[in-house]
Structures are given as C-alpha cells and as structure tokens.
Image (tube, coloured by chain):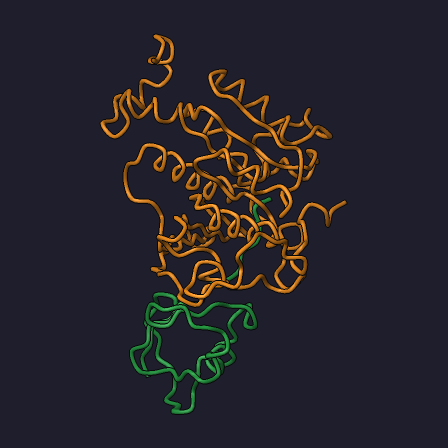
Chain colours: A green, B orange
C-alpha cells in the first residue's frame, strides 16, 4: 500500500484492518498519545483514530507538540 | 513625519517598494507585544526595535540566568540576575531610541492577559510552556487579535500565524494541551542555541508584514524547521469545525488557565 507520510512517499504492507491508531503504533510515531493526525487535509479528531481506516493514496501528516521558546 | 536622521536610519527599508515612507510610518504607528523575553523573544525584540516598530511590549517575569546566554542573544553576561524585560528594554532602546518599549514583569495568566493584549495590533508568542501557548491562543482568538505562534525543541521548530476566525488557530491543530510532563521542555531536552534565532526572526517578519499589510502571512500552514536536516516544510491546514475555541460549537468562551499544563521551562532549573 502506498501512502504519503509527512511529505514522503511510503510503502507499507497491505493490511485491510489498519487504522490510524494502529498505524501510529506500527510506525512507532513519537508523541504517539498526543500527536495530531491530519488525513488528506483535515485534522482528525482523536476519538476517530481507532475507527478511521488507512486507504491507498492517503496523505498523512503527523503534527507534534513543540512547547519550547526559552 | 520622518526626520532626516530617521530617513537615513530606515533608508534600506524606505527604498523597498513594499515599504517606502508610508510603510515605515505604519511600522512607527504599529504596536506589537512579545510574550516571553527568552530564546524566541530575543531576536524578535531586537529586530522589531531595529525595524522601527513604534511601540513594543515585552512580557516576562524571569531574571536573566547564566544558562540563558547560549541562545537569548538580547541578554549579556553583565545582565545576569537582572529582570529579562529590563535587560531587553536597554538593548532595544540602545539599538533604536525612537521606539517605545513597554515592559511587563509578570507571567501572563487568565487574570491579566486580556488587559495586556488589548492595546496591541499583533501579538507574538515566544513562551516556553503549553499553559502560556494555549492561553495566548484563546485570548487572541476571543479578542480577535492576530498573532504568531512559535515552538522550538532540540533541533526542531514550528511556527504559524493566526488570524482569528479567518485562519486555523493553535487549538484547531491541538485541541488540548498535552498532560503535564508528557512533552519534554528545553531545559530537560536541550535546544541548539541558533534555533530560536531562525524561528524568532520568522515570527518578527510576520509582525512586520502584518503592520505593512504586504505579502502573504503564514496562515493556514504550519511551517516546520529541522536544523539537523536543514529542511523547512509547510503543512497546509484549514480551520477545524470541532475546534474548542473557534469551531462551530465552541466550548471555550472565556479565558481560563490550563492548570494541568502549567510547567515553566526555566522554573525547572531553579
């Protein structure tokens, strides 16, 4: 399956049961519990991560908290 | 009216067709508030003063510490122990005696932020903690004040400009702050000293463009910067209809402190 993650074309194994939540775990995304996911241009509500499937061609951005300024 | 020496001081601005004498006057008439006189605040304050932004507010309750000097280029070794806002004011007035610097030696909170931001055209978030970042977002969105968000950590930074109710706000991206201690701070995880120079200068650029009314602001796109990879990326965003402060059914209708997120980077050092 081909998707785009943070601007990079990425091939991942076919897995019809894959959700955004399981993708975060599969890729061991940092800040996994807090990261914001933008799917095809829309910010996903966190409760939807577990029910949203990952589809061929999806464009996914992980948006991370960055709290410094000091 | 610009004096002869001002015309000379700002000559490299004035010859730009996007600025000119009229634009320089707009900068003079402009009022920008910088919240945080640390890593991000340092280059922001220096460049806005040099540019001739007429009134610059700067808010920070902290004193200059030896560990600040690796990146907070507005503070010098002899300033250690001095209030950061005083140290900043001295350098800003020294660069440009034309500008009026207003200092706020206090932490911003739900109790004081509305009054502080009220007198400014554009706000810049140069704070180092999520409580302040969410508070600034909510206060600016509720007051309709445009502002620049900036965040840095280690070798990475991000920034976005928010025009309330026109473009995506910080809560459109991050509805709630992360739990306390969930995300490391600069004092815990480190920050390369040049990083706030890059991000802060971009934030200052946004304030100047806003005052001039020229160019395209960094709205509806999050600019991320990796110093290690030397890469900038832009992530297109749009307003989130379920945003708790600017969405269709907002749950945040008044300013309140995010108590769970209250951690101040520099306080951890003390």
Q: Is residue B119 above or below residue B141?
A: above
How many numbered circles does the render carry? 0
- In percent of width and height, residue B246 lies at 44, 58
Locate residue B185 relative to residue B231 in the image: left or right. Answer: right
Please identify the quadrant where the C terminus of chain B is shown: top right
Locate residue B213 relative to residue A47 in the image: left or right. Answer: left
- In percent of width and height, residue B174 lies at 50, 62
Query: Residue B105 sits in which quadrant?
Result: top right
Which of these two is toward me, A60 or B241? B241
Query: Residue B214 sits in which quadrant?
Result: top left
Q: In this view, does A33 lie above or below B199?
A: below
Query: Residue B7 sits in which quadrant?
Result: top left
Give the residue at the far left of this rendering: B17
- In percent of width and height, residue B240 lies at 40, 64
Please identify the quadrant where the N terminus of chain B is shown: top left
Identify which residue is drawn at 36% across, 48% down: B218
Locate residue A48 relative to residue B105 in the image: left or right. Answer: left
- In percent of width and height, residue B148 lies at 45, 45
Identify which residue is drawn at 36% across, 33% down: B211
Give the residue at the far right of this rendering: B270
Which of these two is toward me, B227 or B215? B215
Q: Is residue B62 above or below residue B79?
A: below
Q: In this view, does B33 lie above or below B260?
A: above
Identify which residue is drawn at 35% across, 55% down: B220
Give the residue at the far bottom of this rendering: A16
């Amino acid at each position: 399956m081909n998707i785009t993650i943070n601007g990079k074309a990425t091939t991942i194994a076919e897995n019809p049961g894959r959700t955004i939540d399981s993708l975060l775990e599969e890729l061991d995304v940092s800040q996994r519990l807090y990261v914001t996911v933008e799917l095809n241009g829309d910010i996903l509500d966190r409760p939807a991560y577990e029910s949203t499937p990952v589809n061929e061609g999806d464009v996914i951005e992980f948006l991370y908290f960055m709290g410094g300024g000091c | 009216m610009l004096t002869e020496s001002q015309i000379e001081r700002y000559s490299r601005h004035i010859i730009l067709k996007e600025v000119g004498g009229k634009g320089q006057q707009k900068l003079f008439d402009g009022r920008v508030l910088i919240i945080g006189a640390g890593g991000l605040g340092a280059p922001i304050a220096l460049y806005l003063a040099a540019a001739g932004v007429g009134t610059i507010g700067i808010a920070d309750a902290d004193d200059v510490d030896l560990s600040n000097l690796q990146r907070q280029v507005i503070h010098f070794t002899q300033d250690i122990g001095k209030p950061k806002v005083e140290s900043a004011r001295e350098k800003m007035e020294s660069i440009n005696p034309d500008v009026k610097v207003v200092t706020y030696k206090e932490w911003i909170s739900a109790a004081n932020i509305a009054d502080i931001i009220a007198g400014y055209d554009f706000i810049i978030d140069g704070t180092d903690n999520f409580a302040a970042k969410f508070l600034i977002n909510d206060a600016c969105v509720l007051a309709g004040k445009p502002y620049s968000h900036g965040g840095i950590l280690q070798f990475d930074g991000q920034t976005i400009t928010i025009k309330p109710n026109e473009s995506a706000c910080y809560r459109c991206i991050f509805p709630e702050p992360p739990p306390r201690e969930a995300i490391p701070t600069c004092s815990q995880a480190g920050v390369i000293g040049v990083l706030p120079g890059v991000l802060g200068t971009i934030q200052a650029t946004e304030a100047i463009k806003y005052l001039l009314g020229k160019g395209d602001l960094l709205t509806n796109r999050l600019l991320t910067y990796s110093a290690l990879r030397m890469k900038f990326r832009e992530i297109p965003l749009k307003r989130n209809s379920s945003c708790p402060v600017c969405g269709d059914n907002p749950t945040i209708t008044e300013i309140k402190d995010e108590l769970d997120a209250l951690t101040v980077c520099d306080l951890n050092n003390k």
